[in-house]
Image (cartoon, rainbow, N blue to C red):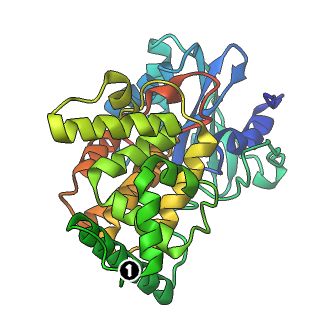
C-alpha cells in the first residue's frame, strides 16, 4: 500500500522530508524529485566543501535527480550547522550561492522548482524570497510515521557502527574458523580423521549446498550460531563464494545457484558470467527485495563484528555492496574505509570505491516508486 503524505505549505513540507529520506539529514543538501504534485523519494548529497566547483556539483546533482523516471520538478532543502548572516541588506542564508547554482541548473534542464528551503540551528527559511525571515524550528510539525520506514530521528550516519562483539565472542569465532579450515583441508587431503571438532564437521556438511546455507542465514540474521558465522567468513574470504552470496541476496535461492554454477564454470573452464548475472553487481536488472537486502546486511554486519581482523574484508565489502544497493552510499563508503585500513588492495572493495567516488548509483534507484532514498557523497 502506498502512503500519501500531504503538505499544504513549506513548514508541512519540511516536516515530511525525514519520512521521505528515511532519516533526519544533517550537513546535507536534499533534492526531492517531483512528478506533477507528488514526490516519491529523496536524494541526499554532502554539502559542497567550497565554491570552486559549484557548476560541476550542480550538474552532477541535477543529472542524478533528472534520471528518475517521470521527474519534471524538484525541491531542495539545505540542512546546515552554519548560521545565517545578518547584513545591512537583510539575512543571508548559508550556501545561498550553491543553491542558486543548483536551482539554475535545474531550470536549464527543464525542471520546475517547487521549493528551496534552509534549516539552520537558528531556524528555517526559504531561498526563494527576497527578504528571508527565520521560522522557529519547534513550530515545524512532527514527522508523520510511515509504515516500513522506522525511526527517522537519526541522521544519515546513524547505524554505521558494527554491532558489539566482545573479545570472548571474537575468540570463539576465530577458533571456529580455524576448526572449519582444518576440517576442509583434511577433507581435501583424502578424508577426515574423526578427531575433528563435531561442530566443524557439521559446518562442512552445511557447505555441501552453499546457496541453501546462504539462504538459511537470513532466517535469524542477528543470532546465527558461532560455527555458522565462521562458515560464512570462510566463504566470504573466497571471491567465488562471496560473489555468490551477494548475487543470491540480491535475487533469490535460484539466482544464487545459477551464480555458483557460473562462477565454477568460469574458474574451471574460463566461461564468463551471463549478462544478467553480471548486471546484478552493477545495480542493473530487476529491483531487489529491500527487506531481503536488509536481512543480508544484518548478517554480514554481525559477521564482520565477530570476525578476526584478517577475515573482515569479505563481510565488510559485502556490507558495502548491500548498502550501496539500498541507496546508502555514505554507509558503503564507511565500510570500504574499514576494508582499506586492513587490505588496501582488496579487489572488489577497490571497484566499489571507484563507483562510490564517481557517484555511480544502482540503476534501479532511479525507477519511480522504488527506493525512497539515494544517498551519496558530493562529487
Give whichever of 254, 197 is nearer the camera. Answer: 197
Q: Helix, strand or loop at disc 1?
A: helix
Image height of 238 relative to 362, above or below: below
For the question of whether residue 80 can be seen, the reply is no
Q: Which residue is mark 1?
A: 174
**Taking the image as drawn, is residue 280 in sight?**
yes
Would residue 257 be found to the left or right of residue 265 on screen?
right
Horizontal and vertical percent position of residue 142: 83, 49
Horizontal side, residue 180 vs residue 46: left or right: left
Q: Position of residue 373 (x, y in %)?
A: 58, 38
Q: Looking at the image, is 282 positioned above or below residue 300? A: above
Toward the viewer: 268 or 198?
Answer: 198
Observer-nearest residue: 221 or 5? 221
Residue at 81% from the left image edge and 55% from the top image edge: 138
Q: Residues within 10 Å of mark 1 (few under 14, many from 20)?
A: many
Where is residue 198 shown, x and y percent of the image? Answer: 46, 79
Does residue 207 appear left or right of residue 82 in this picture?
A: left
Does residue 233 sit above or below 252 in this rendering? Answer: below
Question: Which of these two is toward me, 370 or 75?
Answer: 370
Q: Quadrant of the N terminus?
A: top right
Picture quarter containing residue 247?
top left
Amino acid at each position: 500500500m502506498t502512503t500519501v503524505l500531504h503538505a499544504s505549505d513549506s513548514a508541512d513540507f519540511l516536516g515530511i522530508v525525514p519520512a521521505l529520506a528515511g532519516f533526519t539529514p544533517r550537513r546535507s543538501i536534499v533534492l526531492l524529485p517531483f512528478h506533477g504534485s507528488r514526490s516519491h523519494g529523496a536524494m541526499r548529497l554532502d554539502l559542497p566543501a567550497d565554491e570552486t566547483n559549484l557548476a560541476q556539483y550542480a550538474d552532477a546533482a541535477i543529472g542524478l535527480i533528472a534520471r528518475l523516471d517521470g521527474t519534471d520538478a524538484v525541491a531542495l532543502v539545505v540542512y546546515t550547522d552554519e548560521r545565517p548572516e545578518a547584513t545591512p541588506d537583510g539575512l543571508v542564508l548559508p550556501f545561498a550561492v550553491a543553491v542558486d547554482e543548483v536551482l539554475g541548473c535545474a531550470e536549464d534542464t527543464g525542471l520546475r522548482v517547487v521549493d528551496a528551503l534552509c534549516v539552520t540551528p537558528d531556524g528555517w527559511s526559504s531561498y526563494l524570497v527576497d527578504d528571508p525571515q527565520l521560522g522557529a524550528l519547534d513550530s515545524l510539525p512532527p514527522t508523520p510515521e510511515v509504515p516500513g520506514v522506522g525511526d527517522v530521528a537519526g541522521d544519515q550516519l546513524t547505524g554505521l557502527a558494527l554491532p558489539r562483539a566482545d573479545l570472548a565472542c571474537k575468540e570463539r569465532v576465530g577458533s571456529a574458523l580455524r576448526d572449519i579450515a582444518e576440517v576442509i583441508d583434511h577433507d581435501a587431503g583424502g578424508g577426515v580423521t574423526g578427531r575433528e571438532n563435531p561442530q566443524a564437521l557439521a559446518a562442512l556438511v552445511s557447505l555441501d549446498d552453499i546457496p541453501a546455507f546462504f539462504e538459511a542465514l537470513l532466517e535469524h540474521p542477528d543470532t546465527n550460531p558461532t560455527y555458522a558465522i565462521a562458515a560464512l567468513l570462510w566463504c566470504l574470504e573466497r571471491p567465488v563464494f562471496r560473489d555468490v552470496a551477494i548475487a543470491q541476496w540480491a535475487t533469490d535461492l535460484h539466482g544464487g545457484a545459477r551464480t555458483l554454477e557460473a562462477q565454477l564454470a568460469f574458474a574451471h573452464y574460463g566461461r564468463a558470467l551471463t549478462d544478467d548475472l553480471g548486471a546484478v553487481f552493477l545495480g542493473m536488472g530487476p529491483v531487489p527485495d529491500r527487506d531481503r537486502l536488509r536481512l543480508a546486511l544484518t548478517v554480514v554486519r554481525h559477521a564482520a563484528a565477530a570476525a578476526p581482523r584478517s577475515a573482515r574484508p569479505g563481510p565488510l565489502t559485502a556490507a558495502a555492496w548491500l548498502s550501496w544497493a539500498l541507496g546508502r552510499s555514505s554507509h558503503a563508503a564507511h565500510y570500504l574505509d574499514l576494508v582499506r585500513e586492513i587490505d588496501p588492495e582488496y579487489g572488489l572493495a577497490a571497484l566499489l570505491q571507484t563507483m562510490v567516488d564517481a557517484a555511480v548509483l544502482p540503476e534501479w534507484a532511479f525507477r519511480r516508486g522504488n527506493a525512497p532514498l539515494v544517498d551519496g557523497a558530493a562529487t
